[in-house]
Image (spheres, rainbow, N blue to C red):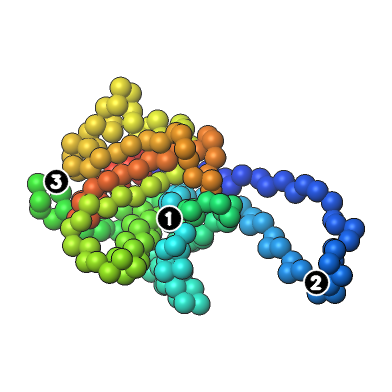
Protein backbone atom coordinates (compact mmCIF):
# COMPACT_ATOMS: atom_id res chain seq x y z
CA UNK A 1 0.00 0.00 0.00
CA UNK A 2 1.39 3.36 -0.97
CA UNK A 3 1.53 6.49 1.09
CA UNK A 4 -2.03 7.60 0.36
CA UNK A 5 -3.15 10.91 1.83
CA UNK A 6 0.43 11.73 2.78
CA UNK A 7 1.53 15.31 2.45
CA UNK A 8 4.30 17.04 4.36
CA UNK A 9 3.09 19.98 6.46
CA UNK A 10 3.59 23.30 4.72
CA UNK A 11 6.65 25.26 5.73
CA UNK A 12 5.82 28.27 7.86
CA UNK A 13 7.54 31.57 7.22
CA UNK A 14 8.30 33.97 10.04
CA UNK A 15 7.96 37.60 9.08
CA UNK A 16 8.31 40.90 10.89
CA UNK A 17 10.76 42.25 13.41
CA UNK A 18 10.54 42.37 17.21
CA UNK A 19 8.58 45.34 18.58
CA UNK A 20 11.15 47.84 19.89
CA UNK A 21 8.60 48.81 22.54
CA UNK A 22 7.03 45.53 23.76
CA UNK A 23 5.12 47.33 26.53
CA UNK A 24 3.36 50.25 24.78
CA UNK A 25 0.97 50.74 27.69
CA UNK A 26 3.75 51.04 30.22
CA UNK A 27 3.13 47.57 31.63
CA UNK A 28 6.14 45.66 32.89
CA UNK A 29 4.37 42.32 32.46
CA UNK A 30 5.92 40.24 29.75
CA UNK A 31 3.66 38.80 27.09
CA UNK A 32 3.34 35.04 27.02
CA UNK A 33 5.79 33.70 24.42
CA UNK A 34 4.14 32.34 21.29
CA UNK A 35 4.10 28.61 20.75
CA UNK A 36 6.85 27.49 18.35
CA UNK A 37 5.59 26.05 15.05
CA UNK A 38 5.23 22.28 14.87
CA UNK A 39 7.98 20.40 13.13
CA UNK A 40 7.04 17.94 10.37
CA UNK A 41 6.57 14.41 11.63
CA UNK A 42 9.00 11.91 10.12
CA UNK A 43 7.45 9.08 8.14
CA UNK A 44 9.54 5.94 8.77
CA UNK A 45 10.12 3.42 5.99
CA UNK A 46 7.22 1.01 5.73
CA UNK A 47 4.79 3.51 7.24
CA UNK A 48 1.98 5.60 5.80
CA UNK A 49 0.26 8.81 6.89
CA UNK A 50 -3.44 9.65 6.81
CA UNK A 51 -4.98 13.05 7.51
CA UNK A 52 -8.45 13.40 8.95
CA UNK A 53 -10.45 16.60 9.45
CA UNK A 54 -12.17 17.11 12.80
CA UNK A 55 -14.25 19.99 14.10
CA UNK A 56 -12.25 21.91 16.69
CA UNK A 57 -15.01 21.53 19.29
CA UNK A 58 -14.40 17.77 19.38
CA UNK A 59 -10.62 17.79 19.60
CA UNK A 60 -10.59 17.91 23.40
CA UNK A 61 -12.57 14.67 23.53
CA UNK A 62 -10.19 13.01 21.08
CA UNK A 63 -7.20 13.99 23.21
CA UNK A 64 -8.84 13.23 26.56
CA UNK A 65 -7.94 14.49 30.01
CA UNK A 66 -4.15 14.77 30.25
CA UNK A 67 -3.98 13.09 26.83
CA UNK A 68 -5.30 9.76 28.11
CA UNK A 69 -7.54 9.00 25.11
CA UNK A 70 -5.04 9.76 22.39
CA UNK A 71 -2.28 7.95 24.28
CA UNK A 72 -4.48 4.87 24.55
CA UNK A 73 -5.25 5.00 20.83
CA UNK A 74 -1.53 5.15 20.09
CA UNK A 75 -0.77 2.31 22.48
CA UNK A 76 -3.52 0.11 21.03
CA UNK A 77 -2.56 0.60 17.39
CA UNK A 78 1.14 1.40 17.57
CA UNK A 79 0.45 4.48 15.44
CA UNK A 80 1.60 8.05 15.95
CA UNK A 81 -1.37 10.41 16.25
CA UNK A 82 -0.95 14.18 16.36
CA UNK A 83 -3.33 17.14 16.27
CA UNK A 84 -1.90 19.61 13.78
CA UNK A 85 -1.82 23.34 14.47
CA UNK A 86 -4.34 25.44 12.56
CA UNK A 87 -5.12 29.14 12.04
CA UNK A 88 -7.36 30.69 14.68
CA UNK A 89 -10.10 31.30 12.13
CA UNK A 90 -10.31 27.63 11.13
CA UNK A 91 -13.28 25.69 12.61
CA UNK A 92 -11.44 22.45 11.91
CA UNK A 93 -8.20 20.74 12.86
CA UNK A 94 -6.22 18.11 10.98
CA UNK A 95 -5.47 14.87 12.82
CA UNK A 96 -2.35 13.19 11.47
CA UNK A 97 -2.16 9.40 11.79
CA UNK A 98 1.10 7.64 10.99
CA UNK A 99 1.38 3.88 11.23
CA UNK A 100 2.79 0.74 9.68
CA UNK A 101 1.48 0.07 6.17
CA UNK A 102 1.79 -3.71 6.12
CA UNK A 103 -1.45 -5.64 6.43
CA UNK A 104 -1.30 -7.50 9.73
CA UNK A 105 -4.75 -7.37 11.33
CA UNK A 106 -8.48 -7.56 10.75
CA UNK A 107 -11.51 -5.48 11.67
CA UNK A 108 -15.13 -6.51 11.48
CA UNK A 109 -17.33 -4.50 9.12
CA UNK A 110 -20.68 -5.02 7.47
CA UNK A 111 -20.92 -5.70 3.76
CA UNK A 112 -23.50 -4.01 1.53
CA UNK A 113 -25.58 -7.21 1.70
CA UNK A 114 -25.84 -6.75 5.46
CA UNK A 115 -23.55 -9.62 6.41
CA UNK A 116 -20.58 -9.12 8.71
CA UNK A 117 -17.12 -9.71 7.35
CA UNK A 118 -13.55 -9.36 8.55
CA UNK A 119 -11.38 -7.16 6.36
CA UNK A 120 -7.62 -7.05 6.52
CA UNK A 121 -6.12 -3.74 7.56
CA UNK A 122 -2.78 -2.20 8.45
CA UNK A 123 -2.03 -0.56 11.78
CA UNK A 124 -2.38 2.82 10.11
CA UNK A 125 -5.84 1.98 8.77
CA UNK A 126 -6.92 0.56 12.13
CA UNK A 127 -5.76 3.74 13.86
CA UNK A 128 -7.65 5.90 11.35
CA UNK A 129 -10.87 3.96 11.98
CA UNK A 130 -10.42 4.10 15.77
CA UNK A 131 -9.78 7.86 15.72
CA UNK A 132 -12.94 8.42 13.67
CA UNK A 133 -14.93 6.19 16.04
CA UNK A 134 -13.74 8.39 18.89
CA UNK A 135 -14.81 11.54 17.02
CA UNK A 136 -18.29 10.02 16.62
CA UNK A 137 -18.45 9.15 20.32
CA UNK A 138 -17.49 12.71 21.28
CA UNK A 139 -20.09 14.17 18.89
CA UNK A 140 -22.80 11.89 20.31
CA UNK A 141 -21.88 12.85 23.88
CA UNK A 142 -21.95 16.56 23.06
CA UNK A 143 -25.32 16.34 21.30
CA UNK A 144 -26.85 13.85 23.72
CA UNK A 145 -27.82 11.31 21.07
CA UNK A 146 -27.45 7.60 20.43
CA UNK A 147 -25.42 6.83 17.33
CA UNK A 148 -27.04 3.53 16.39
CA UNK A 149 -26.68 3.01 12.65
CA UNK A 150 -26.96 6.68 11.73
CA UNK A 151 -25.42 8.05 8.56
CA UNK A 152 -22.01 9.51 9.37
CA UNK A 153 -19.51 11.53 7.35
CA UNK A 154 -15.73 11.49 7.30
CA UNK A 155 -13.44 14.05 5.68
CA UNK A 156 -10.00 12.91 4.56
CA UNK A 157 -7.29 15.24 3.27
CA UNK A 158 -5.34 14.26 0.16
CA UNK A 159 -3.38 16.04 -2.53
CA UNK A 160 -4.91 16.33 -5.99
CA UNK A 161 -3.07 13.32 -7.43
CA UNK A 162 -4.20 11.06 -4.60
CA UNK A 163 -7.77 12.30 -4.87
CA UNK A 164 -7.63 11.53 -8.57
CA UNK A 165 -6.63 7.94 -7.89
CA UNK A 166 -9.72 7.52 -5.70
CA UNK A 167 -11.93 8.76 -8.53
CA UNK A 168 -10.17 6.70 -11.19
CA UNK A 169 -10.32 7.06 -14.95
CA UNK A 170 -13.80 8.10 -15.94
CA UNK A 171 -14.89 7.76 -12.33
CA UNK A 172 -14.74 3.96 -12.48
CA UNK A 173 -12.95 3.48 -9.16
CA UNK A 174 -15.20 5.72 -7.10
CA UNK A 175 -18.33 4.28 -8.70
CA UNK A 176 -17.26 0.74 -7.77
CA UNK A 177 -16.60 1.79 -4.17
CA UNK A 178 -20.06 3.38 -4.02
CA UNK A 179 -21.68 0.29 -5.48
CA UNK A 180 -19.85 -2.14 -3.18
CA UNK A 181 -20.38 -0.20 0.05
CA UNK A 182 -23.47 1.92 -0.53
CA UNK A 183 -21.59 5.06 0.47
CA UNK A 184 -21.53 8.51 -1.10
CA UNK A 185 -18.23 10.18 -1.97
CA UNK A 186 -17.44 13.78 -2.88
CA UNK A 187 -14.10 15.37 -3.73
CA UNK A 188 -14.00 19.04 -2.69
CA UNK A 189 -11.49 21.38 -4.30
CA UNK A 190 -13.02 24.74 -3.39
CA UNK A 191 -13.97 26.49 -0.15
CA UNK A 192 -11.48 24.41 1.78
CA UNK A 193 -11.02 24.84 5.54
CA UNK A 194 -8.32 27.33 6.51
CA UNK A 195 -6.25 24.51 8.04
CA UNK A 196 -5.43 23.07 4.60
CA UNK A 197 -4.38 24.61 1.30
CA UNK A 198 -3.83 23.76 -2.36
CA UNK A 199 -2.87 21.28 -3.75
CA UNK A 200 -4.73 19.50 -0.95
CA UNK A 201 -8.33 18.47 -1.49
CA UNK A 202 -10.97 16.98 0.78
CA UNK A 203 -12.48 13.57 0.15
CA UNK A 204 -15.77 13.32 2.01
CA UNK A 205 -17.38 9.94 2.55
CA UNK A 206 -20.91 9.50 3.86
CA UNK A 207 -22.22 6.08 4.89
CA UNK A 208 -24.18 4.30 7.58
CA UNK A 209 -22.03 3.71 10.64
CA UNK A 210 -22.11 -0.05 10.08
CA UNK A 211 -20.77 0.39 6.53
CA UNK A 212 -18.31 3.14 7.31
CA UNK A 213 -15.29 0.91 8.02
CA UNK A 214 -15.64 -0.90 4.74
CA UNK A 215 -16.12 2.32 2.75
CA UNK A 216 -13.18 4.25 4.21
CA UNK A 217 -10.85 1.26 4.06
CA UNK A 218 -11.61 0.95 0.36
CA UNK A 219 -10.91 4.65 -0.17
CA UNK A 220 -7.53 4.63 1.55
CA UNK A 221 -6.52 1.46 -0.29
CA UNK A 222 -6.67 3.30 -3.63
Q: Residue at x 25, y 40 (%)?
A: 184
In depth, the one of 123 and 204 nearer the eye is 204
| Percent position of residue 183, x then y | 23, 42
Q: Quadrant of the C terminus?
A: top left
| Percent position of residue 49, x then y | 47, 50
* Horizontal arrangement in the rendering, residue 220 relative to residue 68 (left or right): left
Q: Earlier in the sequence, mark 3 or mark 1?
A: 1
| Percent position of residue 130, x then y | 34, 61
Residue tagged by mark 1? Answer: 54
Q: Give the CA separation, mark 2 to mark 1.
A: 34 Å
Q: Is residue 27 above or below residue 139?
A: below
Q: Residue at x 46, y 68 (%)?
A: 60
Secondary structure at numbered mark 2: loop
Residue tagged by mark 2? Answer: 30
Front: mark 3 or 1: 1
Q: Earlier in the sequence, mark 2 or mark 1?
A: 2
Q: Give the CA separation, mark 2 to mark 3.
A: 60 Å
| Mark 3 Cα shell of 10 Å, populated few (<14), some (14-19), many (≥20) | some
Where residue 143 sits, quadrant-wise, is bottom left
Amino acid sequence: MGSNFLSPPAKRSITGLPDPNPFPNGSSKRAKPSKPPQQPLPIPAGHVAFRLLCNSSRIGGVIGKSGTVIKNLQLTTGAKIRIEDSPNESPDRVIMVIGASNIDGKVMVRSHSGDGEAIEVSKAQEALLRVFDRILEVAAEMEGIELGDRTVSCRLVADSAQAGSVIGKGGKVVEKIKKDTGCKIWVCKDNLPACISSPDEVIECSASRSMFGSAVTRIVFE
